[in-house]
Amino acid sequence: QVQLVQSGGGLVQAGGSLRLSCAASGRTFTIYRMAWFRQAPGKEREFVAALTWSGGTPSYADSVKGRFTISRDNAKVAVYLQMNSLNSEDTAVYYCAASEGMGSSYRSWGQGTQVTVSS
């Protein structure tokens, strides 16, 4: 089992930047893919960005392409989400997630962190 602990987030003005972190522990050797999702009030959880732990090109939702960057630290077994040019539509609770094995669903989730963008 993989445990995920998130940090970062908070309140930022429109146009500003924030960085989210997600540290993994437990059976981290099983991690295949890690991702960020978000859920705005009254909306369903949506995909933001993901990367395969072994490498390759990250994937992004169209709404964040060019503004958000997902990255990882292999030594720390952590994944990050750098968010630039934030706007009010980015306000949401952000979750990191991990899948174990190709084609597996995201079974491990972080506790969530609030990101609020003020206009």
Image (cartoon, grey):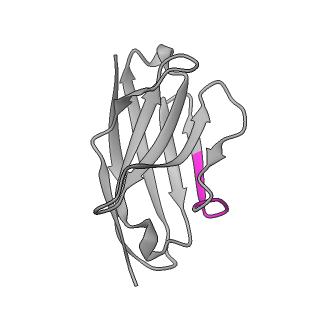
Q: Position of residue 8 (x, y in %)?
A: 36, 54
Q: Nearer the viewer, residue 4 or 101?
A: 101
| Towards the viewer: 37 or 114 | 37
Residue 66 included in the magenta stretch of the image? yes
Q: Residue at x 55, y 46 (%)?
A: 49
Q: Residue at x 56, y 21 (%)?
A: 103
Residue 50 in picture, x, y percent from top left:
57, 40
Residue 45 drawn in magenta: no
Q: In the image shown, does 103 or 35 lie closer to the viewer?
A: 103
Instruction: Using the image, determine if residue 45 lies above or below residue 87.
Output: above
The answer to whether any part of residue 9 appears in the image is no
Relative to 33, 110 lies left or right: left
Is 61 left or right of 55, judged from the image as shown? left
> At which x and y percent is residue 112?
30, 47
- Point out the stretch of residues depicted in magenta: 64-70
Left or right: residue 85 compared with residue 115: right
The quadrant in which the C terminus is found is bottom left
